Amino acid sequence: MFGAMDRIQELIARLTSEVQQLIRLEIQLAQTEVGDKLKSASRAVAYAAVAGVFAFFSVFGLLIAAIWGVGEVLPIWLAALIVAGGFLLLAGLVGLIAWKRAQRASPPYPDAALEDLRAIPDELKGAL
């Protein structure tokens, strides 16, 4: 009888130890997952910044070419106003798209780790 009680106590102690280890591993997984997502996001932002700089400087060439092109038909001041208005319209459209996408963006939560943690209570109930 006492041997069975000792065995149960040993199993409970082992279960407690393994649950603690599992929780530590899940926390490590969450930290790693968030870190990886943040590294990926920071690289994307860096590349986007470089692309933005190149695009910014190329806009000047496009502006000059567009103004000269429209200036062949209209006075140069009117051509400059039309081209500037077109670029402002494009800027507003792209800004609206960026705003809508930012609203839909998901925060960098550790999705896989959270799913694993939510499943632990059910697994423990099933094991008992």
Image: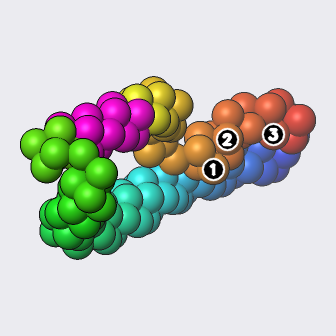
Q: CA distance from mark 3 to mark 1?
A: 16 Å
Q: Quadrant of the C terminus?
A: top right
Between discs 3 and 1, the one toward the N terminus: 1
Q: Mark 3: which secondary structure?
A: helix
Total number of numbered discs in the rendering: 3
Left or right of residue 49: residue 93: right
Between discs 2 and 3, the one toward the N terminus: 2
Specify the amino acid type for callout 1. Ala
Q: CA distance from mark 2 to mark 3?
A: 12 Å
Of residues 30 and 79, which is closer to you in this image? 79
Does the CB distance between marks 3 and 1 fall below 8 Å? no
Does the CB distance between marks 2 and 1 fall below 8 Å? yes
**What residue appears at the point 72 percent right and 32 percent down from the top-left corner?**
121
- Label 3 or label 1, whichever lies nearer to me, is 1
For disc 3, the neighbor class at 10 Å (few under 14, some 14 to 19, many from 20) is few
Q: Mark 1: which secondary structure?
A: helix
Instruction: Give residue 92's mark.
Output: none
Residue 41 location (% of width, % of height): 37, 59
Q: Which residues are magenta?
A: 81-94
Instruction: Give residue 115's mark.
Output: 2
Of residues 76 and 126, which is closer to you in this image? 76
Residue 3 location (% of width, % of height): 81, 49
Instruction: Give residue 112's mark.
Output: 1
Specify the amino acid type for callout 3. Glu
Is residue 86 a member of the stretch shown in magenta? Answer: yes
For disc 1, the neighbor class at 10 Å (few under 14, some 14 to 19, many from 20) is few
Of residues 90 and 13, which is closer to you in this image? 90
